[in-house]
Amino acid sequence: MTKWFYHFVIPAKELGSSELGLDLWIEIGSLSTGCHPNPAFHFLFLTFYFPLKALYYYYMKLTFCGGVRGVTGSCYLLETKTHKILVDCGMFQGEHAQEYSQEPFDFDPKKIDAVILTHAHYDHCGRLPLLSKQGFTGSIFCTPPTKSLTNIVLQDAQHLMADNNHRMNTPILFDVDDVKNVDGMICVMNYHTQFEVIPGVNVMLYDAGHILGSAFAVVDIDAKHTADSKARRIVFSGDIGNNDVPILPETESISNADIVICESTYGDREHEPVDTRMTKLRDMIKNVIGDKGTLLIPAFSIERTQELLYELDRMIDDQLIPNCPIYLDSPLSIKATEIYQEFANYLRFDRDIFSSPDRDFFSFPNLHVTLTVDASKSINDDDRSKIIIAGAGMMNGGRILHHLKRYIEDLRSGILIIGYQAEGTLGRRIFDRAEKVRIYGDEYDVKVKVGAIGAFSAHGDRRKLRQWLKTCQEPIGQIFLVHGDADVKENFKIYLEKELGGNIEIPKYWQSFEW
């Protein structure tokens, strides 16, 4: 006698059991009775079985919600059956920044239980106020310096949004109250302190050596949350710092990991030796000041500015550069430097800072700090040769634009680039030696001298990233490359496959992986 059956199995692990599963046979027709399979049963089967399966399916899922369409906008969603957390929630910068930044979240912010914040750079923390604005009420975990720096970064961003809205009618994505809400949600955690972020998921932060308070996050997932009932360790790199940074500790080792989400900003190149930093900086200053020009240094407010001040302090002490006024014309840089001084115990200096005549590692007699708008405008009254350090680092906003308008067509003057310039930014066009650029809608000829120092980068190059990945005691099961331009990630993948082997993937936007 011929019979028709549906046979389906729900394994024990999908029921959350270590022993018992379901093995079901359902008769749906018989030749002897003339009863043939009813198409309606197919509908009922798909309608009720698969939701039942989903109800009992325990899994861990990682979704790439950002950091995969370029170098900015880092955001990763980690889910268990009952909880959701984010690692970073950054703003997009560079090409498509306005379009991407206004996109809705591809998840419900109200259902996010917590956020792990690796550091305070805007491309890692910039959308936190939006998350709060749209219903997130959980906790944000980060180191103590990151909390302080994040607050001033978001305040500055909101101020720039309001200014750009006034000048160019661009949208204001969040307000001052949203920034205050974020600050109130932050729970500070010291390095090497394990905490349970959601049930069955423990996190520990380690020093990434990128900026003050930066961390890579080691996330341990309990076996009950995985499809194969095996615990997993995922490491989120955040941003990994450069080697031999004169004011920061070295990046800590991974120890071990099953999965690593690894940044790849400079995955296709190697920085020049660190000892060239002083030489190139000294030579550029001598060249421009010797021609009686003005040297503009567009600086990222956090880390690059402090590192630059530290090097200038050293060269002035050693009388290696001409005596000239140096202006720090960035409110965010000024506030960030105060936070660096407050958390000096997190820093590591490559010389005895108290040997400096002024006994201060970030200031010197001819440094002028211009916090207010009027103080900034007064720089124009100084017709001497000088150095102006101003944000934004990618020249996509901030006071540096006003100085560029004044000096970009001056053959005697110069621009020194000391940080990454994202695709589509004014900084990238100048770095690529464009002959003409537009600033606030007006076109200018680029006549200034243009120089760059890669050794000032706060990001490790491909050698540093490989070195960091190799600190893992056992082979890493899977590496995902993020936070890099498409061609850079492809080249880095080839490089790592040759150097490390293993399973290396380049995830797409909103692509998910389950374990």
Image: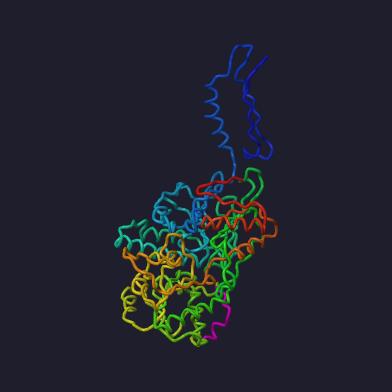
Which residue is nearer to you in this view: 140 or 364?
364
In the rendered structure, the answer to whether residue 483 lies left or right of residue 103 reads right
The image position of residue 345, as x and y in percent, is 55, 74
Q: Quadrant of residue 348?
A: bottom right
Residue 42 vs 317, above or below: the answer is: above
Q: Quadrant of residue 430?
A: bottom left
**Residue beneath the point at 55% across and 19% down:** 38
Examine the structure image and report whether residue 89 is included in the region drawn in magenta.
no
The residue range painted magenta reads 347-356
The image position of residue 474, as x and y in percent, is 70, 57
**Residue beneath the point at 36% across and 73% down:** 409
The type of colouring in the image is rainbow
Which residue is nearer to you in this view: 95 or 305?
95
**Residue beneath the point at 62% across and 52% down:** 504
**Residue beneath the point at 46% across and 82% down:** 286
Classify the position of the N terminus by image quarter.
top right
The image position of residue 333, as x and y in percent, is 43, 72
